[in-house]
């Protein structure tokens, strides 16, 4: 807590802005000791911080100077959801990474993702429709070893949701049962979907899940499961499920490849590489608010495992975490120590449209929690910050940030455990705010209000990161860069 108070005194009493009002000395993408023009982006808190938008903009930037960019996604599946706005078109992406909408980009869905074939095909179709093209502008490649997440997994998760507390907050997309199948060494991978004897493999799988679901007192065929952009459907009989899969199999088959060599070739070339992680550090099962965490590896280390060691994440030039500048949001069953109640939470939710992109659930709003964030940034080895939603600030309401926790009057730190966090009492600082609406048309650092610059200096010092990007609204052009 004292460290944060010292930084507060330095910024707000002594006027030290830690050079936040100036651009970075060098372009960090071109640092010679790292792999040039490589960048990895993850969520710094609990998801939905706008990492897809940052990945989209960086990819677009690279494509101005380079013919090719590789965009790689390595974790999660249809639980993710982010909206990219290009001109007047809004596109919600789930399993596809942001690079998929750009010509010149090779968009890879990597080895440790869990892919739902029918939702993936629906998403490809919806994206083409939204941009008014018959084909995706990018080259989409799906790793043959990516795992499958099927209606069986969704049904099993629906059943678990009724029976166990750990699954309560889940998106219902079957993510943790799909990853559990990997641990049980029982997974179906994309290569199984495109194999000749796929029906045999999927029949076995269906029967296995029939038994599991029956064990909880339900019948697999009559469990309701969600569909992208449509109403729920029943899993139905084995034949019905196979018939649905057969349709998506036709679309997916030509996109499947082994991406190991592709990655190796790209990584050893001069072409830019953008890694876009899904979910966020605070949803990682090792570091998040357990048990309401996701099942995939949300850290940069997942890039190393998904690419099978081709990419050492320590060699990536720029490792960015994205946060919402003045508040956090959370969707699920976790209860955050800094949860915001009352009219301010309501106002932020409406102003920033804080409703889940995948499930449309209203998101909980919370004050910035520095003990949690600094823990996540440390274990996540974050080096750069992208702060989105700087426009969500009201000049008459101070920005409240939590600088420490106490239990029975004694100072304690963050622990990744809901039971523990239920006991902590947050200690806050109130910082001078600015008129967020006025930042919406600001494109240069110097035009930002003094209070916003002070706040950015404070937060970056507390998190021990360099500022790279700030966004002040949903459009591509509402972005300010520090390099
Ligand atoms: P699952 O990933 O569906 O298993 O859900 C586990 C937890 O992570 C739940 O609290 C979800 O709401 C949350 N979650 C999963 N994906 C996202 C995301 O992309 N944004 C925000 N929360 C997410």
Image (tube, helix red, strand yellow):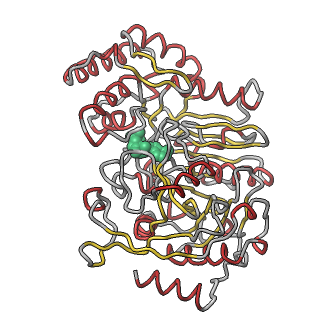
Question: In the rendered image of this protein, does residue 32 appear above or below residue 102?
Answer: below
Q: Residue furthest bottom?
A: 14
Residue 75 can be seen in this image = no
Judging depth in this view, the residue of 431 and 42 nearest the camera is: 431
Task: Name the residue rendered at 41%, 66% in the picture.
Answer: 372
Residue at image coords 51%, 70%? 400
The picture places residue 66, in percent across and down from the top left corner, at 77, 52
Relative placement, left or right, of 473 versus 283 is right
Q: Position of residue 26 (x, y in %)?
A: 71, 75
Height in image: 474 above or below 154? below
Quadrant of the picture in which ligand 1 is shown? top left
In which quadrant is the N terminus drawn?
A: bottom left
Frontmost residue, 430 versus 467? 430
From the viewer's perspective, is residue 129 above or below residue 349?
above
Q: Relative to 322, say whether 26 is above or below.
A: below
Residue at 28% of width from left, 43% of height from top? 166
Please report the residue visible at 75 percent of the width from the left and 32 percent of the height from the top.
131
Q: Is residue 274 left or right of residue 279?
A: right
Given residues 362 and 81, the one toward you in this image is 362
Image quarter hosting the C terminus: bottom right
Q: Position of residue 227 (x, y in %)?
A: 50, 24
Expressed as whole percent of the image width and height from the top left, the position of residue 472 reads 70, 59
Residue 67 in view (yes/no): yes
Q: How many marks?
A: 0
């Amino acid at each position: 807590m004292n460290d944060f108070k010292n930084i507060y005194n330095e910024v707000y009493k002594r006027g030290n802005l830690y050079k936040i009002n100036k651009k970075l000395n060098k372009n960090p993408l071109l640092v010679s000791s790292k792999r040039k023009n490589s960048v990895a982006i993850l969520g710094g808190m609990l998801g939905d911080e706008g990492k897809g938008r940052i990945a989209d903009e960086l990819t677009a930037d690279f494509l101005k100077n380079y013919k090719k960019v590789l965009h790689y996604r390595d974790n999660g599946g249809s639980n993710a959801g982010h909206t990219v706005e290009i001109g007047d078109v809004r596109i919600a992406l789930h399993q596809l990474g942001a690079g998929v909408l750009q010509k010149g980009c090779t968009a890879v869905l990597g080895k440790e993702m869990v892919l739902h074939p029918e939702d993936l095909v629906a998403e490809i179709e919806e994206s083409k429709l939204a941009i008014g093209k018959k084909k995706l502008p990018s080259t989409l490649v799906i790793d043959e070893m990516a795992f499958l997440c099927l209606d069986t997994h969704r049904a099993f998760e629906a059943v678990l949701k009724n029976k166990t507390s750990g699954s309560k907050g889940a998106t219902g997309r079957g993510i943790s049962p799909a990853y559990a199948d990997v641990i049980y060494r029982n997974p179906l991978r994309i290569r199984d979907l495109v194999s000749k004897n796929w029906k045999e493999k999927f029949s076995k799988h269906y029967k296995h899940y029939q038994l599991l679901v029956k064990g909880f007192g339900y019948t697999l065929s009559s469990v309701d499961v969600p569909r992208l952009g449509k109403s729920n459907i029943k899993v139905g009989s084995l034949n019905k499920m196979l018939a649905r899969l057969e349709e998506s199999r036709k679309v997916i088959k030509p996109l499947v490849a082994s991406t190991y060599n592709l990655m190796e070739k790209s990584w050893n070339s001069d072409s830019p590489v953008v890694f876009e992680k899904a979910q966020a550090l605070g949803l990682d099962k090792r570091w998040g608010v357990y048990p309401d965490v996701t099942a995939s590896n949300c850290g940069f280390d997942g890039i190393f495992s998904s690419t099978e060691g081709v990419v050492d994440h320590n060699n990536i030039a720029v490792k960015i975490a994205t946060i919402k500048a003045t508040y956090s949001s959370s969707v699920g069953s976790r209860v955050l120590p800094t949860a915001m109640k009352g009219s301010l939470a309501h106002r932020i939710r409406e102003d920033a449209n804080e409703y889940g992109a995948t499930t449309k659930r209203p998101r909980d709003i919370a004050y910035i929690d520095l003990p949690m964030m600094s823990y996540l940034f440390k274990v996540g080895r974050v080096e750069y910050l992208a702060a989105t939603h700087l426009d969500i600030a009201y000049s008459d309401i101070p920005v409240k940030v939590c600088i420490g926790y106490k239990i029975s009057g004694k100072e304690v730190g963050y622990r990744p455990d809901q039971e523990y966090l239920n006991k902590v009492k947050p200690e806050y600082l109130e910082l001078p705010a600015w008129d967020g609406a006025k930042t919406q048309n600001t494109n240069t650092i110097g035009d930002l209000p003094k209070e916003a610059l002070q706040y950015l200096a404070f937060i970056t010092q507390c998190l021990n990161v360099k500022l790279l990007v700030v966004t002040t609204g949903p459009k591509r052009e509402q972005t300010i860069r520090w390099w």
